[in-house]
Image: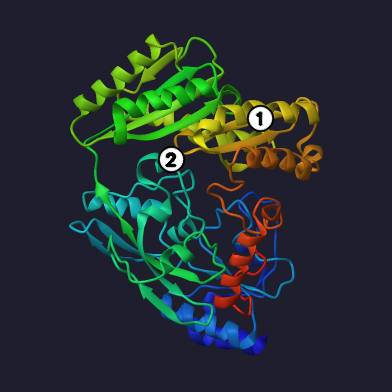
Amino acid sequence: MDTFLNACRSVIGATHVLTSAEDTAPYLTDWRRRYTGKACAVLKPADTQELAALVRLCNEHKVPMVPQGGNTGLVLGGIPDDSGKAVVLSLTRLNSIRHTDPVNNTITVEAGCILKNIQTAASDAGRLFPLSLAAEGSCTIGGNLSTNAGGTAVLRYGNTRELCLGLEVVTPQGDIWNGLRGLRKDNTGYDLRDLYIGAEGTLGLITAAVLKLFPQPKAQLTALAALRTPDDALRLLSLTQSYCVSSLTGFELMSGFCIKLVNQHFPSMRLPFAEEHAQYVLLELSDNESEEHAQAMLEHVISAALQQDLIQDAIVARSIAQSQAIWDFREHIPLAQAAEGKNIKHDVSIPISHIGDFIRTTDALLQQSFPGARMVTFGHLGDGNLHYNVAHPEQETDKSFLQKQTTVNRVVHDSVHQHGGSISAEHGIGALKRTEILRYKSDVEMQLMRSIKQALDPLNLMNPGKLL
């Protein structure tokens, strides 16, 4: 191992080969602080060439590699196991914005770029990069691509996969594939780009990407509606889409219990409604015509929804500050959950038309098996992605409830499967759900995935133990 580490030092410099417990600790514990792995070193290359050289060294010495970006993942995808044999390849130094092309509406960025910085660079060029999620101030675009992250604007712009035109990748053998083509059409064989997006670093290491940009909207308006049921929320979604079409960019469902948790742990945050309600929808319009046009569309939707008794109350933000205050409720739900105690999280995808039935059925099943369990249900209703989290009953400790996680997961995931859904919408599989997918994916699917892994990474050195 000393020979290997010395070779790494000669490639990237001794200061970027971290081996002490103090230096490596931040890279070995997951974001939720539930698991800590071990590594023989954390390696921090400065560019694609250095990374490729490190991969070749890992091949020569048969050292497993665990790629890591901002370490904001929720399924242990960027954390090594406890064997101590692997290295963590931190890509945070690959953080350059290589090129912005406003005419082609593209931006070329390195994998270690913080998502927020890409949004800012796009804005500086008079363009919009629409990927947005709670961790955008610390997550990196390489991780977003590796998990095909979704976020709050999928309804209008799609997942990260839809926002990417080309990639640069270091293969498991240490070769560099330059696929940084800013083309909307390129029908010249297998789509290697889509192979690496969502692969969680198990097939190769994404080092750079060409991303789509969009014109900045002339107006963005936010509203909050109070409703009785998720089914009413689905009807509101259909109504809003019929009036607003592609102007609808966000449609977030939040249960009343979510809002109670935010109120409880952040007392200064209060919704401007006279009464509490069972469900809430945060909706956002982005309009390329004018603010007056967007305002008219939104007011028309709210008026029609009230007339059809789909909503019980609604507010429309009249300023940027009011809009941000509404979004703050949505973004504070995970923080309120954490303050309430550890909970059992599920990132699931359901056909949109089945979401109401899924929530009713699964809530009832959990109450039968775990009386008093509290469901923290919120998410991107417009694209069918729910964060269906289960908190411990008030009379039980979170530590005791977490011991039932396997059984809780089985109830939820079986229900997801029965409703034609997926047990991972945007967080990935990582190590946390690696065995769980065997229950829901067919033997044919699993064998095809294993065949691809074997063909590209026959030594199984790329993020071993993750996804497969």
Q: Quadrant of residue 113?
A: bottom left
Q: What residue type is labelled 2?
A: Thr
> Which residue is at 24% across, 21% downward?
296
Q: What residue type is labelled 1?
A: Met
| SS at circle 2 | loop
- Find residue 428 and report its horizontal and vertical position in percent: 57, 54
- Figure quadrant of the N terminus: bottom right
- Find residue 255 and report its horizontal and vertical position in percent: 56, 25
Q: Which residue is tagged 1?
A: 375
Within 10 angstroms of label 2, few (less than 14), some, or many (20 or more) residues?
many
Q: Which residue is tagged 2?
A: 152
Note whether residue 272 is visible.
yes
Query: Taking 245 as reference, is 423 above or below it?
Result: below
**Considering only order in the chain, which callout, 1 or 2, is on the residue closer to the N terminus?**
2
Note whether residue 13 is visible.
no
Total labels: the figure holds 2
Query: Taking 247 as reference, is 270 above or below it?
Result: above
> Which residue is at 67% across, 75% downward?
40
Name the disc covering residue 444, or none.
none
Relative to the observer, which residue lies in front, 220 or 458?
458
Q: Quadrant of residue 65?
A: bottom right
Q: Quadrant of residue 89?
A: bottom right
Task: Estimate the spatial distance between the alpha carbons at disc 2 and disc 1, rounded to whole Å.
Answer: 21 Å
